[in-house]
Amino acid sequence: MLRLGIDVGGTNTDAVLIDGNRVLAATKASTSPDVTTGIVTAIAGLKEASDFAPASVAAVMIGTTHFINALVEGDRLAPTAAIRFGLPATSALPPLVDWPDRLRTAIGEHSYLCHGGHEYDGARIADFDEREFRAVLEQAARAGARSFAISSVFSPVNAEFEQRAAEIIAEELPGCPISLSHEIGRMGLLGRENATVINAALRELAEHVTAGLTRTVTAAGISAPLFLSQNDGTLMDVDYARRYPVATFASGPTNSMRGAAFLSRQTDCAVMDVGGTTTDVGILQNGFPREASTDVAVAEVQTNFRMPDVLSVGIGGGSHVTRDGGPRVGPKSVGSRLTERALVFGGDQLTATDLAVAAGLADIGDAGRVAHVDKDLVRAGLDHIADRMTEVVDRMRISAEPVPVVAVGGGSILVPDRLAGASTVVRPEHYAVANAIGAAIAEVGGEVDRVFSVQPGRRDAVLDEARQEAVDRAVAAGARPGSVRVVDIEEVPLAYLPGNATRIRVKAVGELSLGDLGDNDA
């Protein structure tokens, strides 16, 4: 079963063709301003390398930066109404209270509070006031809101207010995009609400982008279903991506980590993804990225949806090398202009890539152009890079035991063969396109994250209930039933709440089901 994996990065668009566990072809193309042109070029490059029949492709997986870029730039965001059910509580911190001014302005500053919400055990804070909500809805529509983000206190425990609000919006404003917080974020009102507002603001763009990606793949003669990569290393189909564009935000680092696991056959290790501008380091646990345990800021907005725990440092292949106070590498970078600015390509800026070429670590460009660079400077610069990378790995480790390190990305030539704190350093074959490989091999996931009341003697039964719910969600999302397995379980007793309250999070993943083709292949 041929899979086509594509990862759209800030500098390059990488594409791979995979048959089972074999990489048949890989290519890189420059990411174009409209993104789709770069994808077309990458697919054409694969055809040249492996002359495959487009009809033989069973699935196309794409990791894209469309949506995170739109949020960071504050561009192409829909006017969005943030409506919360929480009164008489929560009035001190209304929706959008912690957003930067530029983003509040970009989505129209539509913030509203209604009575309602629940306690952790599902008891109502106040009843749903339908007249109040309809008045707020009319006010938001008159003010120009075109997308709606609905949140309610403890909605992951009881979502009745959010669901009733969605019914009324569909009745009053048919066709308007609606995002509900219990479907997007985790426990924690503001982080969940912020993620929901971001999602709602991107819904119109998601319609445009998914339609464009579908047309691009179809124009290449490929009729296979299209999937997008999610933050946690799993897949979503195009319809899901239209509803939940926020789920793509960290797909780039996640794809690299999953690709590293596939290429190195390591399931528990540190992954160091070195690009043109930054080095991203994450931890693989059971073959999947360790997820952040705290709220993650995205474009200066605190959120609490699924995000990998990744630490970035400003060192990459295009990083500037300066001599101020001793050799320093980064954080400034030539980025996508590496082939214009680096010395080995005839440019005028000494970069980390130039150091690697001068030291004989890479055969890129014209090595004669860096023959004059002082050997002490080269050695000191590479030592500086090694020290920074060692520091990042140390900060990501959760024990004193050395961890295996898998180096991927086009800039991973900068990673030394030995790092303090690493048991081994592995640079696998096809390391430069690990991100596209991660997209191609992605599975389908399901997750449960909510508060359970765990009565004495009932712990095992409650955990079994949570496991089954996660498995059922994975199957509903498109996983082949017999392939689903639980990969992560987390229990956090909430001592400050009565009733033996425990937050339980379970994640299950399974192989993508592609109907008769997928079943026959299995």
Image (cartoon, rainbow, N blue to C red):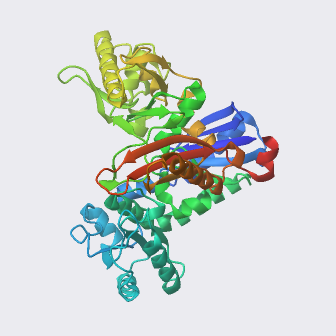
At a point 57% along the width and 38% down the height, the residue shown is: 438
Residue 514 image offset from top left, x and y in percent: 73, 51
Quadrant of the drawing holding the C terminus: top right
User: Camera-side residue: 230 or 104?
Assistant: 230
Vertical side of 305 occupied by 79: above or below: below
Residue 287 visible in image? yes
What is the quadrant of residue 499 in the picture? bottom left
User: Camera-side residue: 279 or 336?
Assistant: 279
Quadrant of the drawing holding the N terminus: top right
What is the quadrant of residue 155 in the picture? bottom left
User: Camera-side residue: 319 or 226?
Assistant: 226
Vertical side of 106 occupied by 234: above or below: above
At a point 48% along the width and 82% down the height, the residue shown is: 168
Residue 16 image offset from top left, x and y in percent: 64, 37
> In this figure, what is the number of numbered marks?
0
Vertical side of 345 occupied by 94: above or below: below
Residue that extends furthest to the left in the rendered view of this protein: 325
Residue 297 image offset from top left, x and y in percent: 32, 50
Residue 359 image offset from top left, x and y in percent: 40, 13
**In-image side of 29 versus 226 (left or right):** left
Residue 13 visible in image? no
Residue that extends furthest to the front in the rendered view of this protein: 457
